[in-house]
Image (cartoon, helix red, strand yellow):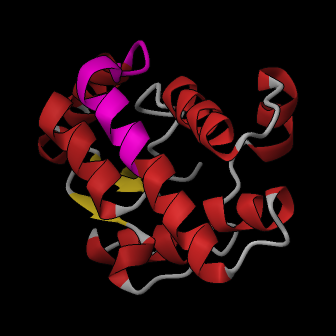
Amino acid sequence: MMAIDALLFDLDGTLIDSMPLHQKAWGRLHARLGLPFDDAAFFAATAGRANEEILVELVPQASAAERDAWSLSKEEDYRALAAEELALIAGTLELKAAARARGLRLAICTAAPPANIAVAERRFGLGGLVDTVACPADGLRRKPHPDIFLEAARRLGLAP
């Protein structure tokens, strides 16, 4: 049997219930762009995908600069919502406590931008719940590449 020394978690939809707020922010962006928005269909087609990928499909005729501005605008909307409404996934604190009681080290491995991570940190003290946070801002490739998970394991002094 393999010993477990650490738990590595994604952030969005795993530790924090951010997906409904991202969805609201996408709905607001659609409204600003004058685009129809089917909440369920959009979520099914885009959950887990990067803004850049989504916007290339959503507005292929737009310039890269326009898509970058819209991506930033969407994330600003998300952060404003999250500052007031973001919730932890049920059981997050209990799982953290149980893991710590067993001597496990903990990491967050997320594709979220640092400003989004900071909102969760301010609301819940997430940095205090884990030993390290690895994200693409650290110069790592986004999921599906394993870079953020490999880096978190390295920081924890563990083989993947």
Main secondary structure type of the part rendered in magenta: helix
- At a point 64% along the width and 31% down the height, the residue shown is 27
Q: How many marks?
A: 0
Decide which of 115, 129 is in the foreground and name it: 115
- The x, y position of residue 121, in whole percent, is 18, 42
- Residue 96 versus residue 22: which sits nearer the camera? 22
The one of 78 and 87 positioned closer to us in this rendering: 78
Q: Residue furthest bottom?
A: 139
Q: In the image, is residue 139 above or below residue 48?
A: below
Q: For the magenta stretch, what is the residue range? A: 76-91
Is 29 rendered above or below residue 73? Answer: above
Question: Residue 38: x, y in percent?
Answer: 83, 25
User: Height in image: 132 above or below 22?
Assistant: below
Quarter where residue 112 is shown: bottom left
Q: Check if residue 33 falls in the magenta segment.
A: no
Q: What percent of the width, then of the height, locates residue 49?
A: 70, 55
Residue 107, visible in the rendered structure: yes
Q: Residue at x 67, y 46 (%)?
A: 33
Compared with 60, 35 (above or below) is above
Decide if residue 160 is in sight here: no
Residue found at x 53% / y 35%: 25
Quadrant assignment, res 137:
bottom left
Question: Residue 29 location, x and y as percent?
Answer: 60, 42
| Quarter of the rendering containing residue 81 | top left
**Is residue 85 on the magenta stretch?**
yes
At 56% from the left and 81% from the top, the residue drawn is 141
Query: Farthest top residue?
Result: 90
